Image (cartoon, grey):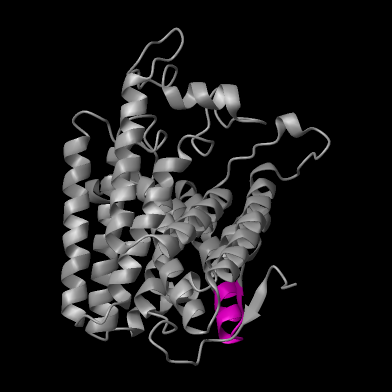
Amino acid sequence: MEAPFIISHLQTDKTPSSIRLASIDALRGFDMLMISGGGAFIYLLGGKTGLPFIDSVSAQFEHPEWHGFTFFDFIFPLFLFLAGTSLAFSIKGGLSKGLKDSELISKIFKRMLILITLGILDKNAPIDIFDPAHIRYGSVLGRIGLATFIGAILYLNFSFTQRIYISLITLITYYLCLIFIPVPEYGAGNLTFEGNLVGWFDRNFMPGKLKQGTYDELALLTQFPAICLTIFGTIAGDILLRNYASLQKLKYLFLFGITGVIAGLVWNLIFPINKHLWSSSFIMLTSGMAFTFLAVFYWIIDIKGYKKWSFFFRVIGVNSLVIYLAVRFINFNYSSELLFSGIYKYAPESWHEVYNALGGFVLVWLFLYFLYRNKIFIKV
């Protein structure tokens, strides 16, 4: 039986399905940068510089209370999308090495169980295993694990076009359910925090603790639209794996990106963009943005060959699971205070938290750089 964590070296085989695109690792690193301290640093700059532009950027790193969208809402959807992109490469690589479909599914199923377990630990630590009613079972890692498992099954059994149709049908069905299925005491089509179908379903069918008490955005119904992000990611992976010219691949990525963004904004007119509900308009918008970001990174790094600038992000991207859990269980900000407060204490007091957050992130990156230099890449 394989160990759950694999410590591996950089890939050296150069078959088409095993080549690791630097743009994918860099974009994943950019995404994890926002989770591992970069987003907090930018947010803390708000109201301190006296520059309206900086304040506007800072405001993009706080989630809206309900309807609406900020850049920070894009971070998790982008990770789900890239999980699908990497999944396409992994499955093609496995098939090229002679693995059977059943073997690949078995591996991904075990990975899903590990991620669900790690997700529960992440959301509940210190976890009281003797009080399951107060354990939160919905988690970021669990959602990634489930989405990649379902995505793998669909990838192995349905074509490129069929997977697009499956995603669109899922999103339309989700929209129709939230609009036409009546919620007791609230009726049909209620998209408020209190009266939406997702919250009612969670309260009645989701075991354990819900994040918001009567609702949890990582619970049951929202799994369906979220999986579509990973399916769209496999579409991007297929585009990159096909024997197209690089500029042709770029054109398709941009085409899907622009289409998704426009579809999300139009759908928003009748089904508001809402991360809490994982609304269909939110999925289309963020998947379109993900296609577009991937296209830009692919063009700059893999087509134009400008790779040196991306090293900073790639160091983060190749150990994304490590840093996601590390920032939860290691207090880098406390270490930053111990190491750097003797320097930044001379700055205005309102800036102390900014410099401390910056120091914490520097420690995070150095930790990941140590793993990178020693060619340690921990995966599930």
Please indicate, yes or no, whether residue 154 appears anywhere in the rendered image: yes
User: Residue at the spot x=49%, y=35% of the render?
Assistant: 217
Q: Residue furthest top?
A: 185
Please indicate, yes or no, whether residue 332 appears anywhere in the rendered image: no
Q: Quadrant of residue 283?
A: top left
User: Residue at the spot x=21%, y=58% of the render?
Assistant: 257
Q: Quadrant of residue 203?
A: top right
Residues in magenta? 366-378
**Which residue occupies the foreground of this view, 335 or 306?**
306
Give the quarter of the figure containing the N terminus.
bottom right
**Which residue occupies the foreground of this view, 261 or 162?**
162
Q: Is residue 199 in the magenta section? A: no
**Which percent across, then down, holds residue 272?**
27, 31
| Type of secondary structure dominating the magenta stretch | helix
In this rendering, would 71 be left or right of 345?
Answer: left
**Which residue occupies the foreground of this view, 245 or 135?**
245
In this rendering, would 18 be left or right of 107?
Answer: left
In this rendering, would 271 be left or right of 134?
Answer: left
User: Residue at the spot x=47%, y=70% of the render?
Assistant: 317
